[in-house]
Amino acid sequence: MNKRELIQPLLLTAIAGVFMGIAAEPWGLWGLAWVALVPLWVNVLSNFTLPSFTGIKTPLLLALVWGIGYYGVALFWITGIHPMTWLGVPWLASLAITIFCWSFITLWGSALVIIWTGLFVILSAKLALRFSKISLALTRVLIATVLWCGLEFLWGSTALWWSSLSYTQSFGNLIILHLGKISGPTTITASLLIVNGLMAEGFILNRDKYYSQTQDQKSYLLLILAVLFFVLAHGLGLILYSIPLQKNPEQALKVGIIQGNIANEVKLNYSGFLQALNGYTTGYVTLANQGVDFVVTPETALPFFWTDQNQRQNSSFYQAVLRQKVPAIVGSFALKEGGYTNSLFSMDGDGNIIGQYDKVNLVPLGEFIPFSEILGKFISRLSPLEATLIHGQPTQQFQTAFGQATVGICYDSAFADHFRRQTAQGGEFLITASNDAYYSSAILAQHHALDVMRAIENHRWTIRATNTGYSGFIDPHGKTQWMSNKNTYQLYSDTIYRNQTQTLYVRWGDWLMPVLLIAGITLFLLKIEPF
């Protein structure tokens, strides 16, 4: 294919990638995700020849273009870190750092698409040696689904993860999100792959001039199967969505949230520290007087070491807890050997620390440097803090005055298994504390979307306490009971209910992934001769 002939498939594939990007929040055009893989699928299979190595260059280029379109748009919020002059970073250096970060995470995501494409087209060519017509199409759909879900599993096991295809459905398509109760995000991602794949294979069959008219009829069969699977998946989700929530009055808790709205550049100076301390103390007292059972603050709401007894006991917030006798969940820091942790502390009504959670998933480059022995010499941290942040242990359990909670801080929200593990160990409600003031406002909606998914997967009432928005309450069906405005100081209280039930996902984890993998390998080995 010459360069001129390549323009059209490149353009269509790039547009499709952008469509997948705007399927996610804050745009929320989730319906586009059910067709946005079709151009990539069709074009990579139409522009690959075996065994020529040069024949794979075009599919990989198409994959790169699609990946840049998707991840570049979906992760554009990272550019909100510019300017970082408040950290003492010169304006041009800040711009360079921002461009590097955006480019890096975009290409990191695109690498998943490139690897998927390379494996998919090579395996498809091998499958074509033994399969024919519609059986080949159905087999390719299964293989492609296994590959993508497997790669998302691998990417999700790394420190840098955010944009699973599944989150394009949150929080607009609550019905399909209920499939997350079955096997987590993999269930939703697999559904998207199957529908896109069946449509793409139908188009390929229909346009292939080597097929007879009877094959055209089979191409329509694939399109019908795509529609049927789409309907059945949503039908199953609707059944799960329609199950009434149990609101046992004995399990009810009235919870207060404080959204401090303290800009990071303000918090770093003494006057900003006092503003934060006064705002959270006043908010705590106000909510306590309203009769809440406990109060939740955002991530690092009180920017000092809560484990330092003198700092803690001399703070106005701690003194307010002693007076009001209302438990609180406080976002602060904890001193550790070799550094400190970004932590949540559970305080009882007497001011005692009865639970502590240390953030497990730290932000790469922002809160820690991967391969620090090598990269630490070349990359300055984006975090304003001077010590070294330490990862919390994945096996932590968080006790509150009203039972065990499933908790996460900010970036933890992207890791579904982090919450599943805690819920399986007895978490009865879910708390997330975040500070997204570093980034553009687009991340506020995406972060809320991730927590909606976690609420559904774990079937837990969820409390979101954020610094600048969107704080809120989410029920186990993913319905947002209340959401704050952005960039405002707000107090709000609502009722949640403790829950001990366990979804299939909580009990068994991502069981669908190994099932898909075994099915794909079995089919491949049974039908393909060694090569």
Image: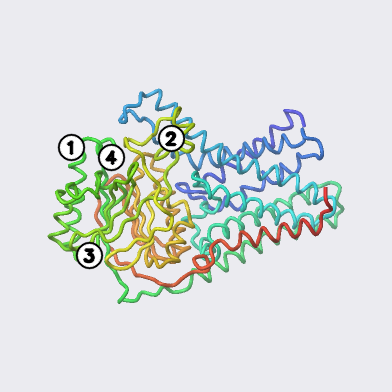
Q: Are marks 4 and 3 in contact (CB under 8 Å)?
A: no
Q: Which mark is residue 271?
A: 1
Between circles 4 and 1, the one closer to the viewer is: 1
> As rendered, which of 294 and 469 lies closer to the eye?
294
Tell me how far mark 2 sits from mark 3, CA to CA.
Answer: 38 Å
Q: Which mark is residue 292?
A: 3
Tell me how far mark 4 sits from mark 3, CA to CA.
Answer: 27 Å
In percent of width and height, residue 340 lies at 32, 44
| SS class, disc 2 | helix
Q: Are marks 2 and 3 in contact (CB under 8 Å)?
A: no
Disc 3 marks which amino acid? Val
Q: Which mark is residue 79?
A: 2
**Mark 2 or mark 1, earlier in chain:** 2
Tell me how far mark 4 sits from mark 1, CA to CA.
Answer: 12 Å
In percent of width and height, residue 118 lies at 70, 42
Disc 1 marks which amino acid? Ser
Residue at which label 4 appears: 263
Categorize mark 1 by other alpha carbons within 10 Å: few (<14), some (14-19), many (20+).
Answer: few
Residue shown at 19% from the left, 63% from the top: 349
Q: Quadrant of residue 249?
A: bottom left
Categorize mark 4 by other alpha carbons within 10 Å: few (<14), some (14-19), many (20+).
Answer: some
Q: Are marks 4 and 1 in contact (CB under 8 Å)?
A: no
Residue shown at 43% from the left, 55% from the top: 394
**Does 242 appear above or below 145?**
below
**Mark 4 or mark 3, earlier in chain:** 4
Disc 4 marks which amino acid? Ala
